[in-house]
Image (tube, rainbow, N blue to C red):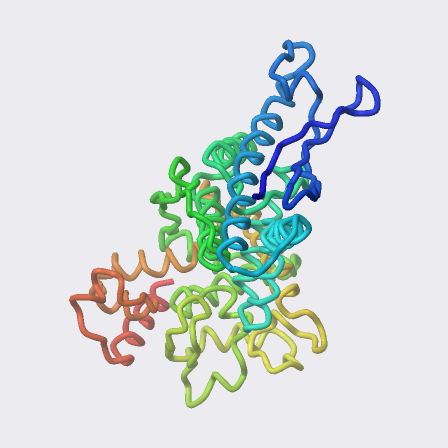
């Protein structure tokens, strides 16, 4: 017969918090395991007054008691599994399995392993997304780890509220929640604990965002700016225009565009986001931008990553941030009240193409939209010459 009791061990002094522990007894021998939570006696006994249990402690106390409930369930599952295995076991074996699970499936540790795995599989961008999500949740938790199966709807609702209060947009908070949900679901399947669907009360959808397309007249004013005395702004403008000329190519695809991708007057590359291969006709406007800068000593075509033996992704991120900062200043120079970023070039190309009467199917093909879009479902793939004609039409109007 195996039993589990929850014990509260008071602190050595009345003003010190005590520990919550689990006493596992089996065949006359006992083993104690810590829950990791520390409460005051009044908090554990629900006798705290408002002065003894301030608001900042109330959430911690609630979480501790929820965690104790989950721990007891988990300990019972361990005991049931060991009992049905027909192999003799001790209280130490139960405690060891409990601690092993707690180490392997603490959220911070588990996500760190997932991040390392993603990097090993050649998915640095996804690894960065997981790291950003983890860092956000760690800040919310004040760096206090939590076991994955102890995530609760209340905890996640508080996390969502905290993000909103800190100015995080709805789509960004939803994005973090979807990453955490994927991690939770993977851990539940891998470890075999019950999926309690703790994300059911938080928002995990995608809101429509404000369109970021610039009028073609604004694009023309940006292109015409005299920036020779402001090299940072000049470079930002050139990269923005290059993205526009390249049918709204994303900055990450521009940064890693290789010299060998330009062949026979065409640039052929794969979108990092979807893996789809696209081909763009190389124009004199694109070549003029490349000619403005010294020949890149690396394998890359554009003057973004220009040094070897460096962390290329870190360089890309730093330059992307610098360009977007400069684009804010460019927006002021052309009297545009719209927030200007590199991503605006993609929206702007699509908007300009639509205004010029380019068929929606060609726009979809030219931007590399995948088959989930309505236009790509109903319209066949188009010849790249038609797309290049559309692109020339747009460039000539700037």
Q: Tell me where residue 64 appears, x and y as whole percent.
A: 60, 31
Determine if residue 167 is in view: no
Determine if residue 69 is in view: yes
* Number of marks: 0
Instruction: Give 229 or 383, whichever is nearer the viewer.
Output: 383
Left/right placement of residue 219 relative to residue 126 reads left
Q: Tell me where residue 87 appears, x and y as whole percent.
A: 57, 61
Instruction: Give 395 or 149, whichever is nearer the viewer.
Output: 149
- Residue drawn at x 55%, y 73% is 122
Farthest residue, direction bottom = 264
The image quadrant of residue 71 is: top right
- Residue drawn at x 70%, y 39% is 34
Quadrant placement of the N terminus: top right
Q: Tell me where residue 113 appears, x and y as whole percent.
A: 61, 61
Quadrant placement of the C terminus: bottom left
Q: Tell me where residue 137 appears, x and y as whole percent.
A: 58, 43
Left/right placement of residue 325 relative to residue 208 reads right
- Residue drawn at x 31%, y 70% is 366
Farthest residue, direction left = 378
Give the answer, above or below, for where 367 lies relative to 205: below
Give the answer, above or below, for where 97 lies relative to 12: below
Give the answer, above or below, for where 376 lies relative to 66: below
């Amino acid at each position: 017969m195996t039993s589990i009791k929850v014990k509260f061990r008071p602190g050595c002094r009345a003003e010190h918090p005590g520990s919550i522990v689990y006493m596992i007894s089996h065949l006359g021998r006992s083993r104690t395991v810590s829950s990791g939570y520390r409460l005051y006696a009044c908090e554990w006994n629900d006798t705290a007054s408002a002065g003894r249990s301030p608001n900042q402690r109330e959430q911690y106390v609630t979480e501790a008691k929820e965690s104790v409930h989950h721990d007891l369930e988990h300990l019972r599952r361990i005991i049931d599994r060991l009992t049905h295995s027909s192999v003799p076991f001790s209280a130490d074996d139960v405690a060891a399995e409990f601690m092993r699970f707690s180490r392997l499936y603490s959220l911070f540790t588990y996500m760190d392993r997932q991040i390392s795995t993603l990097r090993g599989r050649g998915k640095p961008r996804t690894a960065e997304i997981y790291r950003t999500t983890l860092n956000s949740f760690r800040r919310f938790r004040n760096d206090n780890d939590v076991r994955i199966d102890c995530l609760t709807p209340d905890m996640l609702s508080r996390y969502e509220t905290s993000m909103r209060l800190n100015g995080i947009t709805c789509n960004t908070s939803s994005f973090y929640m979807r990453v955490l949900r994927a991690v939770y679901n993977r851990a539940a399947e891998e470890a075999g604990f019950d999926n309690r669907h703790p994300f059911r009360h938080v928002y995990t959808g995608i809101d429509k965002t404000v369109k970021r397309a610039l009028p073609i007249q604004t694009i023309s004013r940006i292109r015409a700016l005299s920036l020779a005395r402001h090299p940072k702004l000049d470079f930002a403008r050139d990269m923005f225009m290059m993205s526009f000329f390249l049918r709204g190519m994303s900055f990450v695809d521009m940064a890693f565009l290789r010299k060998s991708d330009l062949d026979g007057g065409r640039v052929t590359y794969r979108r990092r986001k979807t893996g789809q291969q696209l081909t763009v006709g190389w124009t004199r406007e694109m070549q003029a931008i490349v000619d403005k800068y010294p020949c890149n000593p690396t394998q890359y075509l554009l003057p973004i990553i220009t040094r070897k033996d460096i962390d290329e992704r870190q360089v890309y991120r730093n330059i992307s941030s610098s360009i977007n900062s400069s684009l804010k200043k460019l927006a002021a120079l052309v009297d545009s009240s719209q927030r200007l970023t590199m991503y605006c070039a993609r929206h702007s190309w699509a908007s300009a193409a639509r205004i010029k009467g380019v068929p929606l199917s060609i726009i979809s093909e030219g931007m590399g939209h995948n088959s989930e879009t309505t236009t790509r479902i109903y319209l066949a793939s188009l010849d790249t010459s038609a797309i290049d004609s559309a692109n020339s039409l747009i460039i000539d109007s700037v």
